[in-house]
Image (tube, helix red, strand yellow):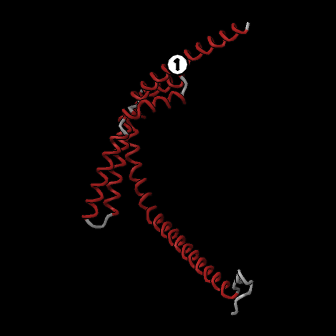
Amino acid sequence: MKKIFVMIFVLGMVVNLSATTVELAKKIDLVNKLMKVTKVEEQMMNSLKMVKNMQKNMINQLTGNIKDRESALKIQQKSFELVMKEFSWNKFQDDFAKIYAEVFSVKELEGLIAFYKSDLGQTVINKMPLIQQKLMPLIQKKVMQLIPKLKKAVEKMVAKEKAKAVARKQAATKQQVSVKTDKKSNPKPDQKTGATPKK
């Protein structure tokens, strides 16, 4: 009787696992279709390029002389090449698909694909870069306004921490002087004789 129960349990687990694997494979397939319909790879590359242009504009505004600007732009170019290499769609696609498959049901994925294949869905996809393009200058403006405030806040925190460090050092020095003074005013008795040295 016990063996039959174990066999039924194991068989149930295998069937359940098999069904889960089939559903996951179906979800991954649907996610890949959704990614293609929504042009995720193209959108991702466009976003990265916009970030690069925003950084370039900020470097131009923040660097005073041409030499500093040229150096900063070279560093930015090298950094961006590394980012483009590491953030390539090929490196993200599988993880992206797994996350979408975990979050959305088969029915939801099918609904999203149907929507994005529709005229309205395609309009949303095609106009998204324009929205991002219009948002970038706004974000850049806000960042540029924030930089002096951040700089001031950081300088204030650094000054405060320096003052604390100086105060701790002064307190430690004062304590050392106090300990030395106590030793002189209260000398320890001689260990052999037990007599206290005269002041």
> Depth check: 107 or 174 in front?
174
> Depth check: 57 or 129 in front?
57
Q: Position of residue 97 (x, y in %)?
A: 46, 29
Q: Position of residue 195 (x, y in %)?
A: 74, 87
Q: Which quadrant of the structure image shows residue 194?
A: bottom right
Position of the N terminus, as image quadrant, is: top right
Crowdedness near tag 1: few (<14), some (14–19) or many (≥20) residues, C-alpha within 10 Å: few
Q: Residue furthest front?
A: 192
Query: Left or right: 62 with respect to 168?
Result: left
Residue at screen point 38% across, 53% down: 137
Residue at screen point 66% across, 84% down: 183
* Residue 52, above or below 60: above
> Depth check: 4 or 193 in front?
193
Q: Which quadrant of the structure image shows residue 86?
A: top left
* Residue 169, above or below 40: below
Q: Residue furthest bottom?
A: 199
Query: Left or right: 25 with respect to 10?
Result: left
Dot 1 falls on a residue whose secondary structure is helix
Q: Which quadrant of the structure image shows residue 84?
A: top left
Residue at numbered disc 1 = 21
Position of the C terminus, as image quadrant, is: bottom right
| Total residue callouts | 1
* Residue 139, above or below 34: below
Q: Position of residue 69 (x, y in %)?
A: 28, 61
Residue at screen point 33% across, 56% down: 57
Residue at screen point 59% across, 12% down: 15
> As shown in the figure, which amino acid type bears the numbered disc 1?
Thr
